[in-house]
Image (cartoon, grey):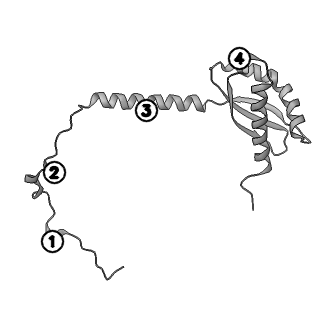
Amino acid sequence: MPKGYTRTDRIAGQIQREVAQLLRLGVRDPRVRMITLTGVEVTKDYSHAKLFYTALDGGNAAVQQGLERASGYLRSQLAHAMKLRIMPQLHFIYDPSIERGAHLSQLIDQAVASDKTSHSPSIAPLDFLSKEGADDHSLPADNVVKKDASRS
């Protein structure tokens, strides 16, 4: 029976925490200052790790070059911190999901704003809720479905 949280998942989580700390405190390259690691996938043989990142400043090409340049340093620091027999090679992949989510949120906000401006702000009164029309829209007594209390 497979477990829901495998060893590769635990190693991926540890790699994500360690690399995030190393990027924040250890790497001096200004190209990799404003990034966030969004996920890590490790192969079953621990030979490769895909690190998904998003850049807050949007400079994708420069950030990718900075991360590739720092990958050797990051791998050596991970080897000291994690004590694995095989330290995976680090492959950085840009994750556009944050930008895509922000774009979708912006589109939803625009649709709501245009919907508000296209409809009139006043709501027409409903005639059937008035006292005069209440009797006209009530159900006839013979069409009312009654629940049998003996059938429970």
Amino acid under label 3? Answer: Ile
Per the model, the C-alpha gap separating discs 4 and 3 is 31 Å
Residue 11, by quadrant, is: top right
Q: Residues within 10 Å of mark 1 (few under 14, many from 20)?
A: few
Residue matched to label 4: 62
Circle 3 packing at 10 Å, graded few (<14), some (14-19), many (20+), is few
Q: Residue 111 at what x, y percent from top left?
A: 38, 30
Taking the image as shown, residue 64 lies to the left or right of residue 114, namely right
The first of marks 1 and 3 along the sequence is 3
Question: Disc 3 on helix, strand or loop?
Answer: helix
Which disc number belongs to residue 142?
Answer: 1
Q: Is residue 17 above or below residue 63?
A: below
56 or 104: which is nearer to us? 56
Of badges 2 and 1, nearer the viewer stands 2
Name the amino acid, label 4.
Answer: Ala
Query: Which one is earlier in the sequence, the residue at label 4 or at label 1?
Result: 4
**Measured Cα–Cα span from mark 2 to mark 1:** 22 Å
What distance separates the C-alpha of mark 3 from that of mark 2? 33 Å
Circles 1 and 3, Cβ within 8 Å, touching? The answer is no
Evaluate if marks 3 and 2 touch, with contact meaning CB atoms under 8 Å apart: no
Left or right: where 103 falls relative to 7:
left
Where disc 2 sits, the SS reads helix
Please determine whether, in this image, residue 61 is positioned above or below residue 89.
above
Quarter of the rendering occupied by the N terminus: bottom right
